[in-house]
Image: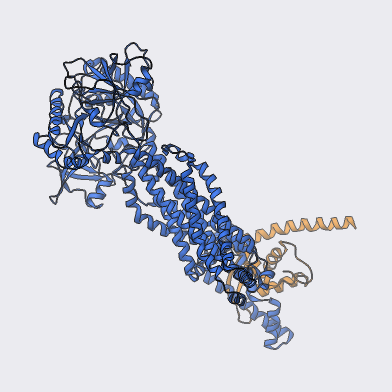
Amino acid sequence: MSLASRVASFLRNLFFSARVERELDDELRGYVEMAVDEKRISQGLADDAARRAVLLEVGGVDQVKESVRDVHAGVLVDQLRQDLSYAIRMLRKNAGFTAAAVTTLALGIGANTAIFSVVDTVVFRPLPYKDPDRLVKICGKALPRNMRLTAVDANCSDDVSLPNFLDIRDQNHVFEQMAADDGVGGSITYADGSRERGINVALVTLEWLSTLGVQPILGRGFLADEDRHGHDRVVILTHAYWKRRFGSDPHVVGQTLAIDRDPFTVVGVLPPNVLRYGADLIRPLVPADYPPGRGYRDLDVFARLKPGVTLAQAQAEIDTIARRLEEQYRATNANSSYSLAQLGRYYAPIQRKAHQGLLLILGAVGVVLLIACANVANLLLARSLARYRECVIRAALGAGRARLIRQMLVESVLLFLMGGLSGILLARWSIDSLRALAVAGDYVPERIVVAVDGRVFAFTVIVSIIAGVVAGLVPALQASRVDPNDGLKASTQASSGGVSRNRANRLLIVSELALSIVLLVGFGLLIRSFMRVQAASGGFNAERLLVTDSDGGRSFASAVMFWRSAVEQARAVPGVEFAAVSSRPPVHGARRQPFMIAGHPIVTDEDARAGDILIGPDYFRAMGIPLLKGRAFTENDDGAAPLVVIISQSLARRHFANEDPIGRLLKVKEQTPMMCCTTAGGPSEVWREIVGVVGDVRQANLDEPPAVTLYRPYSQMVEHDMYLLVRTRSSSDATRVEANLRSALVAADPSREWSDVRPMHQVIDRSESIRLRRFVLTLLGSFAALALVLAAVGTYGVMAYAVADRTREIGIRVALGASRSVILRQVLGETTKLAMAGLVLGGLAAQAMTRFISTMLFDVSSADVVTYAGVSLLLASVALLASYIPARRAAQIDPMVALRHE
Amino acid sequence: MTGSKTSLLQGTLDLLILRALSLGENHGLGIANRVRQITDGTFDVKPGSLFPALHRLEERGWLSAEWGESENRRRAKYYRLTRAGRRHLETETASWDRVASAMASAIAATS
């Protein structure tokens, strides 16, 4: 009852405040009139004498009203509304100040919003699936225990055959549902007749969507009979593809398009970021049309655990089924096992490094926001001088300290929200280019949709409010510390409280400079690492080296022939010095395989694994890799010759410390007769004789230690996808050959496709380590630059203010004979002191922070003297430059003007 | 906030207003006059404390108000006890009695 009436009054006071106010007015007026009537009658006073007496008794109608208002429910909200409208008036009145603050904040908060939307999509946001914890990936081979697959892992993709998938699906009791998919390329012809090649199509089983727990946002999923031949001409578009190619057309369902000339009907669109690797669209996998071989392992399989079933229980069940299948189908399933791992983000390889980099950038952009906050706090502080008298007057009229602080905080939060909203606009405007940058840097999978959406909006608003309170608190406390007497007396020179305000100003500037140092040092260390990586020797010579690749086909004999003739064709191109094939040239990494050495105990740890590369004759010469011992491969090392292998120096050092490796035997798992994956028979193990030792190569990334590697001749063991490497005689030859090589190869065999010929430098430039670094550097560089500008503006503001504040003092000193250069030096000296404090603090902070980037440093110490010296010099000069203008102004103060100015 | 003669204990004003209104509905000035009457002129409630108290009691739901016309045809806001207000008056009166008699005996004992 009482509560209801209070709520009712609350709402009435809030929404019908004009009426409440009018009624209060009427009530009091009525009171006065009646009291006047009474006085007139009872005491026989004249009308105006009675009125005077009554008003005296009442003691001020407005005060009475105010005290009535104070008991009204919702008085706090009402006051907040007053504060807000007052704040809006103030901000509008000081348009210059407001514009400066909002611009600063828009940059600071906008950068945070943009970065957050990327990091959130990739790192924080839960997967767009139902109960993602119950989703598991089923790998066609043994994996280390408890491994969490965060991506399409080279260890675990394209590795289950259709019959095995169907058997596991039908025989298990641990999965609620199971699904499989296979990626195929395709070219699409659209309704308007235009064609697009290289579209990724995924064939998916019917349970695919329901296993993930995903509903199309438009249209429908696949129907029960759409995996039957003749009924399967339907596709569902991924969100990114729908957005890119169809402009997010809401009427796309029902349209037709042709995949490799077969017409398909669009029946649905997936929600954002439900991806099968890089698929653009999905269509039903028709079991009847799919290669039926048990050895044809090309499916990716995942499943949803039944509620309450653990990964270990499921693994045990799958082991049993695998053993059963193994006995049943010896020829294809011998030694095959399956391992389960949590299904992570099932789209593309986002490495741990990338996560680290993204978090680092989020931290860096947070520092930029801190600097922006410090700048705005400085502006607010400077303004609190102008506001001092206002506060004094309000305090004298009875406003409490809390009320004053609240008023100031409302203003600063409002300012920050304005900055935040502008920041969101900035972020929306820049998000696409940021995403493109992140995709190029391998930080974000290509087909991920990044949007400034509700989640990001909420983040920005919360950050703005918190930052607004924090940045507004110091100036608010400062301004509210008023002594009415003091303030009203000091009519013009209201610089009381100036000492502590100045101290706060300086403290803010020092922290700004220190924070800038942290960013600059981070950037400096990373850019030096970057240059070292670029200059690093990979153990090979990238000069005048060209690369291209092709598919040699799926039979051993024809593949070897194809590659042999390709090398001959290449060698015949004028300007070519050497040509050779390789399954994995440097910076492409290498599959790691276990191996055994005859006469050595069996080791099962990482030490007994080596990068496994298939190469042709002349490979080492083409690459500039030194042959340290023994011989290289020749054309004679073919299938009929004894099996041979060449090892890297690090392998030799580790496993043949005091022995000569040449002539020793080494065993690797291999599938005979050749080839990876599909046409291979069961794996077998064969002994190979070591015939040579070569120099170490940084096989995967130039910033990683060289990999232990073993090389086998492609003529004894071949893969279908291989690379052709060509070294030219001179750099002008390189340009010429780059243009001619592909046409020469195609002319020799028009049935084969070759990729573009690219210089090795370009390959390295696009390698993971360089791309990852470039992205971090681009952003960190921009942020460091922004920080520097903000710090410079802040320093300028504080010094200009300090000089203006002391015009009179400086005037007197000049009048007393201080020379202009002394004044100039003094102001600059003050800046130097601030800069020194900032440098020391920043240097210490940077030292503490470098551990976050220690993994990204390469050949540069985290205490790199050059970086620290350079950064200090840069920041000190910027600070001095920023204070030079106010310093000159101080030096030019005319004593007469200054003294009159008060 | 009080009459010149005696300072009011916290809550006393509320009780006086409720008591004054238990005799029938009235407007602000009427309530002030009635309080003066029933306390034999001890309490003279000024508008600065009367109106905030009236609005507070109204928002608590102990009073209801409506606009009417006074004896000499002035527009006035008339307050009346609600059922909850009457109940509140009873409990407050009871507790006031307890306090008053306790105070009386305490003062008698020490003197």
* Residue B101: % across, % down: 81, 57
- Residue B79 shows in this picture: no
Q: Quadrant of residue A387?
A: bottom right
* Residue A46: % across, % down: 70, 89
Residue at position x 68%, y 60% in the image:
B89
What color scheme is it? by chain
Task: Please tell me which residue lies in front, A321 or A108.
Answer: A108
* Residue A534: % across, % down: 34, 40
Where, quadrant-wise, is the N terminus of chain A in this rendering?
bottom right
* Residue A898: % across, % down: 59, 74
Q: Eyeballing the image, is B5 above or below A747?
A: below
Task: Please tell me which residue lies in front, A401 or A541.
Answer: A541
Q: Is residue A23 left or right of residue A611?
A: right
Task: Please tell me which residue lies in front, A902 or A454.
Answer: A902
Most extreme residue toward the right, as rendered? B111
Q: Is residue A364 left or right of residue A294?
A: right
- Residue A125 shows in this picture: yes
- Look at chain A in the picture and name its colour: blue
Q: Eyeballing the image, is A456 above or below A25?
A: above
- Look at chain B in the picture and name its colour: orange
Where, quadrant-wise, is the C terminus of chain A in this rendering?
bottom right
Q: Eyeballing the image, is A465 above or below A742?
A: below
Residue at position x 32%, y 47% in the image:
A449
Residue at position x 29%, y 47% in the image:
A217
- The number of numbered badges drawn on the structure is 0
Q: Quadrant of residue A307?
A: top left
Q: Eyeballing the image, is B36 above or below A587?
A: below
Task: Please tell me which residue lies in front, B26 or A707.
Answer: A707
Q: Is residue A503 left or right of residue A284?
A: right
Q: Is residue A307 left or right of residue B65?
A: left
Most extreme residue toward the bottom, as rendered? A46
